[in-house]
Image: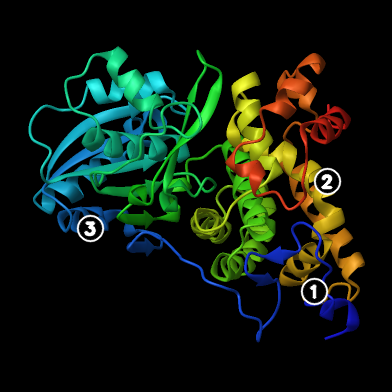
Amino acid sequence: MDRNTTSVVQAERTPGSLLEGGPVAAGGIDPGPWDFLAPPTIRFGAGRLDEVGQIAAALGNRAWLVGGRRSLLATERRERIEQSLRSAGLGVDLAVVSSGEPTVDDVAAALAGLPAGARDGVVVVAVGGGAAIDLAKAVATLSTNLPPGLSPHDYDVGIVDRLEGVGRGIAITRPPLPVVALPTTAGTGAEATRNAVISCPRRGFKKSLRSPLMMPRAVVVDPDLTAGCDRATIAASGLDCITQLIESFLCRVRRPLPRALVLEALPRVVLALPRLLVDPADAEARGAMAHGALLSGMALANSGLGMAHGVAAALGVECGAPHGLACGLMLPVALAANAPVAWRDYALLERAVDPEGPADDRAAAARFEARIGGVCAAAGLPTRLSELGLRRERIAWLAENSGGSSMRGNPRELDPATLAEILTAAW
């Protein structure tokens, strides 16, 4: 190990250079206490969709399907899923159809329209991208933590009161209905997280319903389920995955196991995404992306995120920007902003991707920024905030409203004024 690499252990005490409980370091340094939460059952591999019935039958006897119009209703997979569930002895109801990133109104309507009858033995089977899986987790959680039969207004209030930072902060105390998640995009990692992101355009927020109890009980990651994604979805979801991996590696609240997951997943993903953008039929690349998305969810659920996700959430409120697209735009901006305190970690990530890369940490860090910039450029997504419809006079608002839980994990302290300067340069 050369002197530059050894400096990771001897890093000065700048914000973001330390693990909570000790330095970011190799063996021999006590990492301090940590926990790790993940779905108890994970099945990964092509063709494993047909195992969903066996998995769900171990959790209950009646399945509520929650899925998107394109991810479930408009595909042959619905018949396969229902056949698998019924063959395993479960009754099946199409409970909720997702129409995009869930809002408070969507969740309230879903709760009001749930199938009648007792909920003992109900398993929620979520089929779709992050939006559908988040909606399923919210429905599974709130259907046991709110009484049935409420008015739309009372459901609205009950939902908001349980979201972070906007209501009364009522905790999730009753275990949700068990969720079995089947992701059909490779990006959000929602199948392995303990929260559901819910927005409210009427009130102007995008917040999380969060509890360790919300972790799905089982996950079936079948890369074949992502085969129908168009190029725009592949690009946006793939960059969301990459952003989650990088930010969970860099963030202040870092833990050794999530960082190890990132070092395993990120090299595969940054090589696979450009291939998949050229050839969506590339099964090997599709599998690498599905694998990376799963690990990105596990990593972020057990560490934190940063500036790119913090700003992306506010962009969703202000401009209606899809989450993955906003993350893809913000990732190079965030890397440049955090480089003064995080360049050593950039060097570690670059060497994970290319062990034959520069030996000098500064050179390796620069190579990593350039590499990620190239992946973002290949995706062909917007590169300026103005392209998302953000008005220049709203930059100050955006900076003020990007300071949620994601931003608190950013390795560099960014007050709203400093963040506004960075966003102005990216406008």
Q: What residue does disc 1 label?
A: 8
Mark-to-mark CA distance, 1 and 3: 44 Å
Q: Quadrant of the N terminus?
A: bottom right
Callout 1 amino acid: Val
Asked if the residue at tag 3 contacts the one at tag 1, i.e. Cβ–Cβ closer than 8 Å, the answer is no
Mark earlier in primary sequence (3, 2): 3
For this view, does 251 lie left or right of residue 255?
A: right
The span from disc 1 to disc 2 (Cα, nearest Å) is 20 Å
Q: Is residue 274 left or right of residue 171?
A: right
User: From this viewpoint, is residue 216 visible?
Assistant: yes
Q: Tag 3: Cα neighbours inside 10 Å, few (<14), some, or many (≥20)?
A: many
Instruction: Answer whether residue 326 is visible to the viewer in this image.
Output: no
Mark 1 or mark 3: which is in front?
A: 1
Residue type at mark 2?
Answer: Ala
Q: Position of residue 149 (x, y in %)?
A: 16, 20
Q: Which residue is mark 2?
A: 337
Q: Residue at x 29, y 24 (%)?
A: 110
Q: Amino acid at mark 3?
A: Ile
Disc 3: which residue: 55
Q: Is residue 32 above or below residue 427?
A: below
